[in-house]
């Protein structure tokens, strides 16, 4: 025994001769351990849930700010013609030049007016009016994942951003009418009555 009356346990002590801890005391130790562990886990889970709620609120604020930014970008007339250079990957996000040679295989009919001289097979996805605004958002610095989430929310394929030189689809999910073709006075006309 040492000076405090506690047994000295070392390599020379025969552990078979040491008395075991009393059963009630052992149960009290186990109960204390379980209650402190459960308390810690409850506190930890509450902390994690609080942080996740805070992150969700921040994501909702960022989504709202992204929608406002998108609306502001759409309200600027002539923004489609402004070239924007990106510092990270200029070849991937800069709009390619328009095609020069017209397609001679496709006969044009007089009954169908063509909006452009280029056929849909020649138009690249980054120049398509429905998708060009997403490429502009990436070009001005909006994070790629945020733009992909916005495309997914609008029912468009976010994988399109990975290949800006791919041909534009012939039929669009909006029935051939892009959001850029809508006029602001048309959308407010129902509220003016």
Image: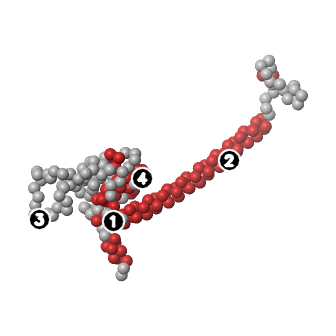
Query: Which one is in front in this view, the residue at disc 3 or the one at disc 4?
Result: 4
Residue occupying image coordinates x 24% and y 50%: 167
Query: Which one is in front in this view, the residue at disc 4 or the one at disc 2?
Result: 4
Residue sitting farthest toward the top: 12
Badge 2 density bin: few <14, some 14–19, many ≥20, Cα 10 Å: few
Q: CA distance from mark 4 to mark 2?
A: 45 Å
Q: Earlier in the sequence, mark 2 or mark 3?
A: 2
Q: Earlier in the sequence, mark 3 or mark 4?
A: 3
Q: Which quadrant of the figure contains the C terminus?
A: bottom left
Q: Which residue is mark 2?
A: 39
Badge 1 density bin: few <14, some 14–19, many ≥20, Cα 10 Å: few
Badge 4 density bin: few <14, some 14–19, many ≥20, Cα 10 Å: few
Residue 190: in sight, yes or no? yes
Q: Which residue is mark 4?
A: 141
Residue 12, placed above or below residue 101: above
Residue occupying image coordinates x 43% and y 51%: 143
Circle 4: element type: loop
> Which mark is drawn over residue 111?
3
Residue 90, placed above or below residue 177: above
Q: CA distance from mark 1 to mark 4?
A: 20 Å
Q: CA distance from mark 3 to mark 1?
A: 31 Å
Q: Which residue is mark 1?
A: 77
Query: Which one is in front in this view, the residue at disc 3 or the one at disc 1?
Result: 1
Query: Which one is in front in this view, the residue at disc 2 or the one at disc 3?
Result: 3
Residue 148: in sight, yes or no? no
**Nearer the observer, 177 or 6:** 177
Q: CA distance from mark 2 to mark 3?
A: 77 Å
């Amino acid at each position: 025994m040492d000076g405090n009356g506690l047994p000295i346990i070392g390599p020379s002590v025969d552990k078979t001769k040491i008395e075991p801890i009393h059963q009630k005391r052992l149960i009290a130790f186990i109960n204390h351990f379980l209650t402190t562990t459960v308390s810690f886990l409850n506190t930890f889970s509450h902390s994690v849930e609080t942080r996740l709620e805070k992150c969700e609120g921040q994501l909702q604020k960022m989504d709202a700010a992204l929608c406002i930014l998108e609306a502001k970008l759409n309200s600027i007339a002539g923004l489609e013609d402004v070239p924007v250079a990106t510092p990270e990957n200029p070849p991937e996000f800069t709009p390619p030049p328009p095609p020069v040679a017209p397609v001679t295989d496709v006969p044009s009919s007089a009954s169908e007016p063509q909006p452009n001289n280029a056929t849909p097979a020649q138009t690249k996805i980054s120049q398509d009016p429905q998708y060009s605004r997403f490429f502009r958002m990436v070009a001005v610095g909006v994070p790629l994942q945020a733009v992909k989430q916005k495309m997914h929310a609008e029912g468009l394929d976010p994988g399109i951003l990975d290949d800006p030189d791919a041909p534009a689809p012939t039929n669009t999910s909006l029935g051939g009418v892009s959001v850029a073709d809508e006029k602001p006075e048309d959308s407010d006309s129902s509220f003016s009555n």
